[in-house]
Image (cartoon, rainbow, N blue to C red):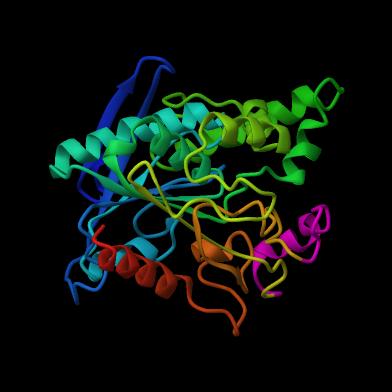
Amino acid sequence: MKYGLLIAGLLSTCALAATQTQAAASQIKSNYVASNYAKTKYPLVFAHGMGGWIRAGTDELGVDYWYQILPDLARNGANAWATRVSPFNTSEVRGEQLLQQVDEILAITGAPKVNLLGHSHGGHSIAYVSNVMPNKIASATAISSPLKGSPVADLIISAQGMPLEQPLVGLINFGSKAIVWAQQQDPNSLPHDALGAGKSLSQAGSKAFAQKYPLGMPKTSCGEGLAKENGVYFYSFSGNSTLTNVLDPDSLLAATGLLMQAPNDNDGLVSRCSAKYGKTVRDNYNWNHLDVINQFFGLRSIFAPDPVDVYRQHANRLKLQGL
């Protein structure tokens, strides 16, 4: 498959001198528009989580990270963009990569602002951009993001200084390059730092990050942040279930969920309280950490809402807010 086909006809490539990286954003389009229900004033810009991608594989056999979500938004009038950053790296490196792509999207669309949405570690990315250039951000929505860190990350970085450290770091960095390669990209076009990623998502690392980039961050252990701060509207939503469908490969999150400080109040990787950011839309969807992005292939509990519907409704919420 040719490079241009992978990104649905629109590629924006920028050089980031500080990290010697290239990053690309893709506009997700539809062959038809069924309604204007999700047509926000400003573009919707999505930031993937740790280990994430835009589209891995070919057009015929590949899979989108935001499975079925962005095409549905486009069909309902949204100007939707997916961004690509290092699968594994620090919050600030990934945030700077996202910032460069936001500037590219603003230049391409002519819009003065964007609406940011970030899943998991992507929540740190949108928090970084919202703090660095709030005048260009209309809203920021964190989706199941460990903004107070995750005990699972603490467990992983506990291998630092142990004989297991080097092979574990090497394996994760290799996997990070493989994810980039699967998107028909040069594996070395983005920097990879598994240990930096783990430290960023640790409880100590996330606390330091929140102090440095405070907009939207809650001031209490399980409270909400300000709904609007420095001209930016902040939102969050998340699930608090681990095992939602025994046929789903992400059932393994039931095991990681037991490592959490709140074993009955998390999505397998992120506790309900850690996911708080700005105004909480809802924090108890019957979803695990991957159900919230409709993975794998939409498998979830039969009693859970369809994530595709929830994103469409949130876009309409932003639209009605004038964003």
Q: Residue 112 location, x and y as percent?
A: 18, 42
Write the residue at 39% across / 30% down.
132
Q: Residue 217 location, x and y as percent?
A: 54, 44
Write the residue at 20% across / 44% down.
10
Q: Is residue 176 above or below residue 138?
A: above
Is the C terminus in the top left, top right, bottom left or bottom right quadrant?
bottom left
Magenta residue check for 250: yes
Give the extent of the magenta segment: 246-264
Of residues 207 and 238, the one drawn nearer to the viewer in this rendering = 207
Write the residue at 48% across / 51% down.
226
Magenta residue check for 55: no
Q: Residue 280 location, x and y as percent?
A: 52, 62
Taking the view exactly as shown, the residue that stands out farthest to the bottom is 303
Q: Quadrant of residue 38?
A: bottom left
Left or right: where 204 falls relative to 48 = right
Left or right: where 102 falls relative to 124 = left
Is residue 304 visible in the rendered structure shown here? yes
Left or right: where 13 falls relative to 165 = left
Q: Is residue 92 above or below residue 306?
A: above
Q: Residue 49 location, x and y as percent?
A: 53, 46
Q: Is residue 262 above or below residue 3?
A: below
Q: Is residue 134 above or below residue 34?
A: above
- How many marks on residues? 0
Q: Quadrant of residue 209?
A: top right
Of residues 179 and 239, the one drawn nearer to the viewer in this rendering = 239
Q: Quadrant of residue 157?
A: top right
Taking the view exactly as shown, the residue that stands out farthest to the right is 162
Write the residue at 47% across / 40% down.
215
Is residue 1 visible in the rendered structure shown here? no
